[in-house]
Image (cartoon, rainbow, N blue to C red):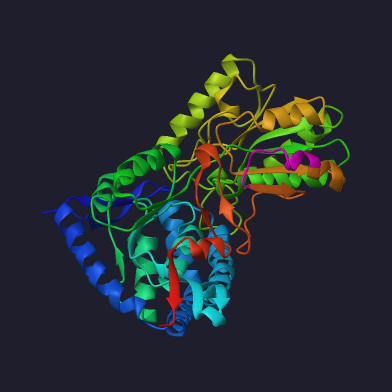
Amino acid sequence: MSDLLKVINPATQTLIRELEMDTPESVATKYARARSGQRSWARVPVSDRKKILSRFRDALVTRKDELANLLTTEVGKPISQSRGELTGVLGRIDFFIENIEATLLPQTVVSRPEQGLEERITLEPLGVIANISAWNYPYLVGANVIIPALLTGNAVLYKPSEFATLSGLAITELLHQAGVPKDVFIPVIGAGEVGAEILKQPIQGVFFTGSYATGKRIAEAAAPKMIKVQLELGGKDPVYVCDDVDVKAVADATADGAFYNTGQSCCSVERIYVHEKVHAEFVKAFQATVKSFVIGDPLSDRTYIGPLTREAQIAVLEAQLQDAKAKGAEVLLGGRRVTGLSGNYFEPTVLTHVNHSMDVMKEESFGPIIGIQKVSSDEEALERMNDTKFGLTAGIYTTSAERAHLILSEVHAGTAYWNCCDRVSPALPWSGRGHSGMGSTLSTAGIVAFTQPKAWHLKKA
C-alpha cells in the first residue's frame, strides 16, 4: 500500500483530495512503459504530432474556466492570474507547433557531388525524459518542457509538483484525450522521494524547474548517468530605476513585477535600486501602488494578493524580515501574517534602508517582500546588481537606450529588460547563470534541447 498525498487548499487549509503516491516499483513499471511507447511515438510523423498538440491547445481554451478554478483552489493563485496563465500558455504552444518542422529539418553541411560525398546533421529525440515540474506556473512552466519534448518524439515521465498535482493530472487527461498515447506521457505522483526514484531509472534526460538546492541534488544524481540535465532554478532579480524616468509609471510596473502571483515567480523583481535623485519620490509612489493591492479570497476577481502556496515559506519571509530589521532596515509596509484569514497569507512588505549584508537582498525570497536600496550612480547600481549568486533576469528603467545598453551588457543574467520586467517571450531563450540554472527553454533552442545530433557521412560507392 503506497502513501497518500494530501492536496490542501492554501487559502483555507482544508483538504481537497488524497492521492495515492507512486512507489519504487510503480516508477520502474512506468519507465518500462515509456521506453516501449517512445519507440512507436518517434515513428509518428511530426505533422501528426502537431495535430495532436493542437487538439490539446484547443482543449485548454474550451476548459479554461474549469482549469483556472482548479489551479486557484490548489495553489492559491488569484483567479484572474490563473486565467491569465491559461491564456498565456497558448502563445508558447503556438510557437513550438509553428517552428518544430523547420527546426528539425536535416542540415546538409558539406556537398561534394564530384567526390560522391555528403555530410549531414539530423536531430533525434533523446528518448525517455523526466520532467520534474513546478507548482507556481504548472501550465506555463509545463509547456516549456512537455510540448517540445513530445513534438520531438520523446516520451515523458511527468512529475507535477506535489503542490500542483491536480493541475498536473488535468494536463495529463487533456493530452491523452488529444491523442498522446498513455505510454508516451505518464504522470508520476508524489513528493521529492518519488522524484528521486525517477532519477534511478535509465532515463535519457531530466528537466527540472524549482529551487537551487533541489536542482543541485538532481544534477548530482544525474551526473554518473551522463545524460542531458536542464535546470530552471531561482533568481534574485534586480531592477535599477534611473533618474530620468516617469516615477509613477515605473513604480506601478515594478510593484506589479514584485508582487504578481504573490511574489512566487522565479523572475519576480526581488530587489530594486533607485537613483538617489528620485529615490524619495519613487518610494512614495511604490508604497501607494502596493497599498492598492487587494488581499483576500483568490477565487474573487478583485483579489491581487492571494495566499502563499507553501505555508513553510512564511517562516523564510519572517526570518529575512527579522534579519533585515536587526541590521537597520525600515519596514514601510506589511511585515507580518494577515490577520482574519485562515490561509497562508502574508502582507505585501516593503523595506528601505536595506543593504547587501541582509538576506533579503541576497537570498531568494519567493514571496511578497521587496527591498528598495538607494544608489548614487549607474556604476554603483551595476555593482549591486551583479553582487549575487543568481543570474536569471535583470532590468533597467531609463529613457536612454544607450544608458540601458551599457548597463545591461555588463549584467550577469540570462535575460535583460529595458523599461519592462517579469515577462517571458516564447521566441527568446529562457536561461539562467550561476545558481539560476543551466540550459535553455523556449525559442528554437528550447526545441533543440530535447534532441541529440547525429552526424551522417554519406559516400557513394
Residue 99, placed above or below residue 442: below
What residue lies at 27% left-to-right and 57% top-to-bottom?
A: 189
What residue lies at 45% left-to-right and 81% top-to-bottom?
A: 46
What residue lies at 87% left-to-right and 29% top-to-bottom?
A: 277
What is the magenta segment's predominant secondary structure? Answer: loop
Give the x, y percent position of residue 314: 46, 34
Residue at far left of view = 1
Give the x, y percent position of residue 248: 82, 43
The span shown in magenta is 406-414
Q: Is residue 412 magenta?
A: yes
Quarter of the image where the N terminus is located: bottom left
Closer to us: 227 or 84:
227
What residue lies at 44% left-to-right and 46% top-to-bottom?
A: 210
Q: Quadrant of residue 21?
A: bottom left
Closer to us: 425 or 155:
155
Quarter of the image where the C terminus is located: bottom left
Closer to us: 339 or 249:
249
